[in-house]
Image (tube, grey):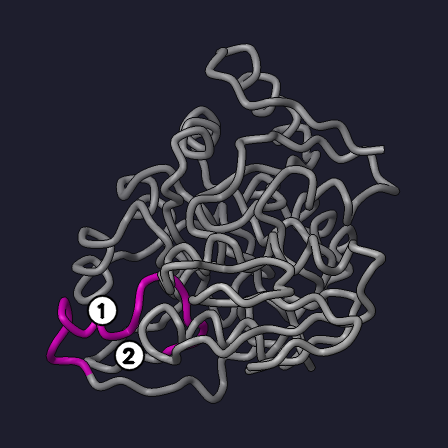
Amino acid sequence: MPIIIKKNNSNNLLKFIKEKLISKQLVALPTETVYGLAGIGTSIVSARKIYQLKKRPLNKKLIFHCSNINMVKKYFYLNNENLILAEKFWPGPLTLILKRKSKKIPLKLTKNDYCAVRIPKNIFCQQVINLLEKPIVMPSANRFKKLSPVSANMVFDQFKDTNLMIIDGGKCKVGIESTLIKVSKKRLETIRLGKISIAEISKVLPFVNIYKSENQKYFSGTSKKHYSPSKKMYLNQKKIRINSAYINFGKKKKGQFKNLSDLSNLDEAAKNLYHFIFLADKNKDFKTISIAPIPNYDLGKAINDRLRRASR
């Protein structure tokens, strides 16, 4: 059975986590996006354990997490457009595809020598990585294609059959995975939509041409079916179905199960999305889950992307 440890600021806890990671064990850590399943980034053994525990295909590459830009520059090439984006959006929910610089990063964890990299905006997570003095690999702490966890209890629910250590840092502030892009030679490829919109990125890099990626299927969040609960989901529902948990957005509706945001706030909706789907999935009073229409702009595009994949 997993062990949940409440996050605290003691050096003892940080050192304990460091020791576990150095000994090639895995730890579930909170970030601002979702909870992650962390292993030391310079160890192929740790990476294999992540793939095995998540039941994740080996062709789906893991995201490297660093504690600061200096660490990124030590292990990866960070320059030109990517450096501009890093200085603007890091730490935060943006993942960049960068070329490996250090051979301490296992080649098998790259795709043609390229890796997905970000700096999380979670102080505790940064402290862990900083103490290690090397990156960690950390995909979402879920089974492959299943619902991403935004709380320690959601992680626990997916790994009941393991002895995984979970650090409880409370509910994630963003609630959906990072925006994932590849930028080179004035070309920006959108791989996964997230909290930071492509419109925001375009303001920082107005000179780049934007493309939707067609051949980056080996990175996170690109599977057609993903983020899925056990129950069938219906999208863009304006009326409440019989025996269906109705997750509303905006004006309150009689009979709703939950409301992502009474005030139609997309940030609030993203934060609540996975948690409310999880609650509906576990509620025995309902056979299915219904989701109200979500506006398809800015963060709404990322929310709708998750919902489409989750409902397949």
Image: 223 above or below 177? below
Query: Could you classify mark 2 by the number of other residues whose Cα lies within 10 Å: few (under 14), some (14-19), or many (20 or more)?
Result: many
Q: Which residue is more in the foreground, 175 or 116? A: 175
Q: Position of residue 44 (x, y in %)?
A: 65, 49
Disc 1 marks which amino acid?
Ile
Q: Position of residue 170 (x, y in %)?
A: 54, 34
Whether residue 82 can be seen here: yes
Disc 2 marks which amino acid?
Leu
Image: 290 above or below 106? below
Q: Give the magenta part as a residue range.
A: 190-208
Task: Give SS at disc 2.
Answer: strand
Q: Which mark is residue 201?
A: 1
Report how many numbered discs are placed on residues in the image. 2
Image: 85 above or below 133? below
Q: Is residue 52 magenta?
A: no
Q: Is residue 191 magenta?
A: yes
Label 1 – label 2 distance at C-alpha: 10 Å
Whether residue 145 can be seen here: no
Quarter assignment of residue 4 = top right
Residue sitting at 36 percent across and 42 percent down? Answer: 121
Q: Which mark is residue 188?
A: 2
Position of residue 216 in the picture relative to residue 291 (left or right): left
Quarter assignment of residue 99 = bottom left
Residue sitting at 45 percent across and 29 percent down? Answer: 124
Image: 53 above or below 79? above
Task: Give SS at disc 1.
Answer: helix
Q: Position of residue 275 (x, y in %)?
A: 60, 52
Q: Single out the mark in the foreground, 1 or 2.
A: 1
